[in-house]
Amino acid sequence: MIFKIECPGCKKNYDVHNSFSGKQVACDCGAKFTLPAAPPEGDFQVCPACRELSSNDNVICTSCGFNFKTGGKTVAKKRIKDDDEPGFWFKYGILIKKLVMLSIILLVGFTVYHYYTAKPFGISAKAPLGLFPVMNTFLDKLNFEFKELPVPAQYPECKMYCFSNAKAAKDSRGMIDEEIMMIADKSGIIQAVYGHYSLPDIAINPNGTVVSRFLGRLRTEVGVPEKPNFKAVTHGTGRMAWTENICNWANQSISICWTRVDNSVGLVSSNQKMAITLAKYSPEETLKGSMPGGDEESTVDGIGKGAGSDMARNISKGINKAINKQQRELEKE
């Protein structure tokens, strides 16, 4: 039996009998080297890279991976151990990124949808004018004075609440007199909303008053046209005649009566009041007699009854106060 060996010096190949295994031999080139120990039986080859015996039938050395046919070394692939398994982020990182992106898209979409469709006053098909608990929370942030008033007869089994801008009245010494009144049933569904306010001249405050902005927002929420049509109605005769602009609008759910008395004296451009009710009620009746001050006798000469008369009285009272104050200052001088 023989084994094949290569001279480490000149790379010459030899076929050596197994009986020479373990002995030192010399090559024709003069190089001396020791033959590896070999079993007495079987044909073997000596790996030129690691000098270990390998079966004559092997193509690759089992000790170092040397390829006997190509003369090169084969690098075995590293076996992945349990400890070398991919980590959590390698496995699930892409999925987590997709979920985060989806969450951001949903959040942005919900925000945009809520901005354009949400009804902050609790308005719905069941409550076309909103819910009083929601509205009360909103108005509570305005720091208005709150009180409960006797409910008008046309609203049985309901309660009426009044929110007055006492701070504005105090700061303006009575020139600004504005209120919001609401009527709600036992379940909190608002049946009617009433408000009156004096709108300052646009040069003084182009944004209007707190009540005017609140009612403007409510009109938008319930679907009232941004610029409704007003009809001019003249009250009184001669020097005591005054004009009231009245707007009536309704849909299947609500009705509105909005009055405006324009003013060319002082710092107030107009006095306005508004009643928005559910369709089954009359906003005109709410303005004329159901709310405080709507139909009471005038305390200023020349101003009669009717929707808008209380607003005319308010501005007239304010002007009289200003004139009286100016007269007192002149007397002191």
Image (cartoon, rainbow, N blue to C red):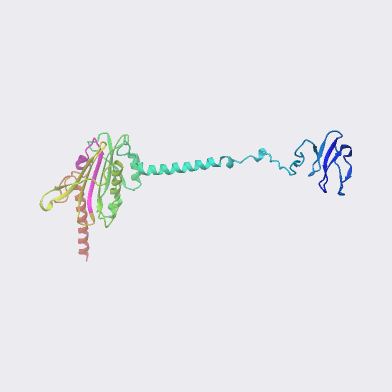
Note whether 173 is above or below 47 in the view shown. Answer: below
Asked whether residue 52 is drawn in magenta, I would say no
Which residue is drawn at the image coordinates 26% and 49% (left, top)?
Answer: 178
Which residue is drawn at the image coordinates 22% and 64% (left, top)?
Answer: 332
Number of callouts: 0
Asked whether residue 290 is drawn in magenta, I would say yes
Let me know if residue 150 appears in the view: no
Residue 320 relative to residue 185: left or right: left
Q: Quadrant of the C terminus?
A: bottom left
Which of the 4 image quarters holds residue 60?
Answer: top right
Q: Which residue lies furthest to the bottom in this view?
A: 333
Q: Pick whichever, 36 or 269, lies toward us.
A: 36
Q: Could you tell me residue 68's position as x and y percent?
A: 76, 41
Q: Pick whichever, 64 or 208, lies toward us.
A: 64
Q: Could you tell me residue 25's position as x and y percent?
A: 88, 44
Q: Quadrant of the N terminus?
A: top right
Residue 86 relative to residue 229: left or right: right
Note whether 234 is above or below 81 in the view shown. Answer: below
Q: Could you tell me residue 191's position as x and y percent?
A: 27, 37
Which of the 4 image quarters holds residue 182?
Answer: top left
**Which span of residues is magenta-colored?**
269-291
Let me know if residue 269 appears in the view: yes
